[in-house]
Image (cartoon, helix red, strand yellow):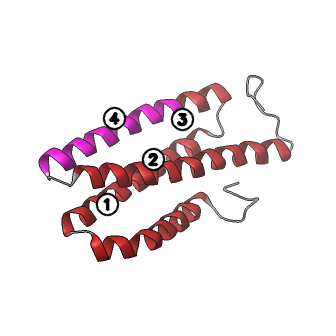
Amino acid sequence: MSGARNGLGFPAQVAIALAVTAAAAAYPLLRYAEAPVLQAVLGGAGMSVLNVFMGYAAIEYSFGKSYTHFVQIVLGGMVVRLFVMAGLLLVLIAVFRFHAVALVSSLFAMYVVFLALEVFYIHTKWQDKIRSGERPPENAPL
């Protein structure tokens, strides 16, 4: 059920999105950015990949459970992910002196891309579950 309708699993979708984004950003970064900016962009992208896979783990872990538990785990996981990302940002900027604007910009840009994939993935999983004839929990929205 991991993206059965579109043929690709979620990790593959993340890899493709990352590759397309890297290809689009490669020329301007390699041509015009200095090493600290490039390092910060890579750090932000890496943090975003970590974030999306933490979300994927929460979705996969909670999907077979009741709708209430699913929502609690996914939303609780979002809070944990928020604090992990904030802590990593602080460490990378304050301790390792990463270029703050490049780090935050790349983190935010990749976060938006991956958030769209994550929402679509959850939607697809629920729709596949409903289409398979498995009855959703009583309090689950359709």
Q: Quadrant of residue 64?
A: top right
Labels 3 and 1 touching (C-beta < 8 A): no
Labels 3 and 4 touching (C-beta < 8 A): no
Per the image, label 3 sits on a secondary structure element best described as: helix
Per the image, label 1 sits on a secondary structure element best described as: helix
Residue 95: x and y in percent read 12, 48
Q: Residue at x 21, y 69 (%)?
A: 34
Residue 1: x and y in percent read 71, 54
**Mark 2 Cα-neighbour bin, 10 Å: few <14, some 14–19, many ≥20:** some
Q: Residue furthest front?
A: 32
- Which badge, 1 or 2, is on the more N-terminal residue? 1
- Image vertical order of residue 35 relative to residue 108, above or below: below
Q: Amino acid at mark 1?
A: Val
Residue 83: image tag: 4
Predominant secondary structure, magenta span? helix
Per the image, label 2 sits on a secondary structure element best described as: helix
Q: Amino acid at mark 2?
A: Met
Q: Which residue is mark 3?
A: 74
Q: Residue at x 44, y 52 (%)?
A: 109
- Image vertical order of residue 67 relative to residue 1, above or below: above
* Image side of residue 24 versus residue 119, left or right: left
C-alpha distance separating marks 4 and 2:
12 Å
Labels 4 and 1 touching (C-beta < 8 A): no
Residue 68: x and y in percent read 63, 25
Front one among 68 and 10 = 10
* Residue 115 on the magenta span: no
What span is in magenta?
74-95
